[in-house]
Image: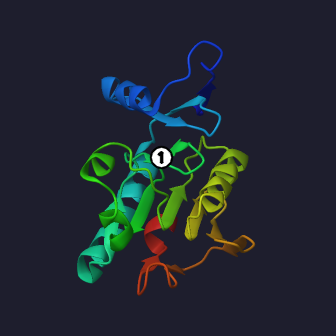
Amino acid sequence: MTAVTVNFNPIIKLTDDQFYQLCRANPDVKFERNAKGELIIMPPTGGETGNRNVEIAADFVIWNRQTKLGKVFDSSTCFKLPNDADRSPDVSWIQQERWDALTPEQKEKFPPIAPNFVLELMSPTDSLKETQSKMQEYMDNQVRLGWLINRKTRQVEIYRLGQRVEVLESPTELSGEDVLPGFVLNMQIVWE
């Protein structure tokens, strides 16, 4: 099953609060919303992808607990990007000072902030073109570093703010560079 885009705009344009309520009223459905306000219904991940997602997220959580530099978020977290899109990266991280600048209500709902870092792990049903477009959207909204991991081709696309995309073939590890100081992801947990 692939993601489905539904355009309700000719009938109703959901406000941010209505979109939030829609997501809360349907907790078993993962919604995103693009910059045009169209709803994107995301299929659930399969077992292999779900397992890899949690293994990757665990490494981020352990690193973040040790460094205390920010906040780590899972794939259920939806962010309101500056372009009005509502997106849920598989793993994301926000620098502590930026997170602390949000109000308690902003933190509780869909935080109106672009993460410093995002990771997308492609599922077998994901479209590469659509996922690359999503990664570019993150960069256009001032995300500083992004990783698009494609297990099927064993490729990683590294997105850096203001730079060309770098494509790596079967890397053994990925560095968090200056965005995630000291973080290194061992790719064995992805490629297994």
Where is residue 51, by image quadrant? bottom left
Residue lying at the far top of the rendered structure: 11
On the question of residue 58 being in view, the answer is no
On the question of residue 110 being in view, the answer is yes
Q: Is residue 17 above or below residue 144?
A: above
Label 1: element kind: strand
Amino acid carrying mark 1 in the image: Lys
Residue, disc 1: 80
Q: For the point 47% across and 46% down, which residue is it?
A: 80
In the rendered view, how is the structure colored? rainbow
Q: Position of residue 172 (x, y in %)?
A: 54, 80
Label total for image:
1
Where is residue 96, by image quadrant? bottom left
Q: Position of residue 118 (x, y in %)?
A: 50, 62
Q: For the point 55% across and 47% down, which residue is it?
A: 123
144 or 156: which is nearer to us?
144
* In-image side of 140 versus 14 (left or right): right
Q: For the point 71% across and 72% down, which residue is it?
A: 167
* In-image side of 48 versus 59 (left or right): right
Q: Position of residue 161 (x, y in %)?
A: 64, 71
Q: Is residue 109 above or below residue 64?
A: above
Where is residue 11, by image quadrant? top right
111 or 176: which is nearer to us?
111
Q: Quadrant of the N terminus?
A: top right
